[in-house]
Amino acid sequence: MLEVDGAQLIVSAGYDRALRSWRLDGTAGALRVDGAHSGPIGALAVLKVDGAQRIVSAGADRAILSTRPAGMRATDSVRN
């Protein structure tokens, strides 16, 4: 679960290569990163790093990306 501006959000990712957030009532949240990966996304986690929330995703493109909740991709990425 991700919290942005006091609202709890669910984060989803999948075959379409996008990261999206959803409010608990099912409506779309503010986070939408189309093309977050160049292939399907197979793993997703929401973490706190040094007190800041991060969305970490891994995809078929063999990349691990750390994304800030505002949709800004952090500089942390690993490609193999």
Image (cartoon, rainbow, N blue to C red):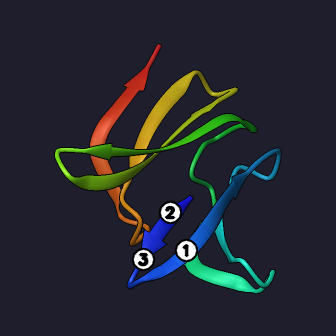
What residue is drawn where x is 29% and y is 50%?
74
Quarter of the view holding residue 27: bottom right
Disc 2 target residue:
2
Q: Residues within 10 Å of mark 3 (few under 14, many from 20)?
A: some
How many labels, in total?
3
x and y, in percent, of residue 21 in the image: 63, 70
Name which residue type carries label 2. Answer: Leu
49 relative position to 77: left or right:
left
Q: State if disc 1 and disc 2 touch (CB < 8 Å).
A: yes
Q: Residue 35 occupies which quadrant of the picture?
A: bottom right
Judge the density around disc 2: few (<14), some (14-19), many (≥20) Cα neighbours within 10 Å. Answer: many
Q: Residue at x 78, y 84 (%)?
A: 25
Is 29 positioned to the left or the right of 7 in the image?
right
Q: Which quadrant of the figure contains the N terminus?
A: bottom right
Query: Residue 53 in the image: x percent, y percent?
Result: 34, 55
- Please give the residue where the numbered disc 3 appears in the rendered image: 4
Q: In the image, is residue 34 above or below residue 77?
A: below
Kind of residue at disc 1: Gln
